[in-house]
Image (spheres, rainbow, N blue to C red):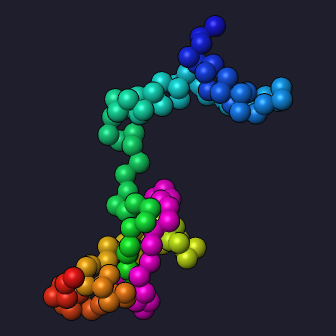
Amino acid sequence: MNISRNLPQQIADKKAGEGKKLQVPMSEFQHIGKQEIDLSLAPDEAYVKCDFLKGDVVVYMDHISFDSLQTIDNYQLNEYYWLENGQLVHRADIRSATPGELKAKRRLDQPTALFVSG
């Protein structure tokens, strides 16, 4: 019996309580892969890469008419992001808000956004 392989199952069983068993299927490959990522030993392509983090303030690109500030809520695969307002947007449709836009609380025209500072 491999104790380390059964550890996730033991933790799930303990959390489930009252004798209920929660199934946590994990292949040996998945288990080793998770350990590598936890220890930062996995190759770079094993990590999810995203341009924005939860809480980042962004604005829509100029080709979209909305000029309000938006906040990133979560990352979705294939370069999509959930915004706090519930919209799903692609990476190509948003950019980080500039300090001037944060101060103005809206998207500014690009030349203006570069010259307005905090």
Q: Is residue 28 magenta?
A: no
Q: x, y percentage for residue 27?
A: 59, 25
Residue 14 appears left or right of 46: right
Inspect the magenta stretch and tell me whether residue 64 lies in it.
yes
Assign the C terminus to one quadrant of the image.
bottom left
Q: How many marks?
A: 0
Q: Main secondary structure of the magenta part?
A: loop
Q: Is residue 103 left or right of residue 72?
A: left
Residue 75 in picture, x, y percent from top left: 47, 59
Residue 10 spot, x, y in % from top left: 67, 23
Left or right: residue 41 compared with residue 29: left
Residue at the location (34% across, 61% down)? 51
Residue 80 visible, this angle: no
Above or below: residue 39 compared with residue 100: above
Q: Nearer the viewer, residue 50 or 108?
A: 108
Q: Residue at x 55, y 21 (%)?
A: 28
Instruction: Give the vertical position of 66 relative to 55 (above or below).
Output: below
Report the residue at 19% width, 88% height from top.
116
Q: Is residue 47 above or below residue 18?
A: below
* Figure quadrant of residue 79: bottom left
Magenta stretch in the rendered image:
61-79
Left or right: 11 in relation to 85: right
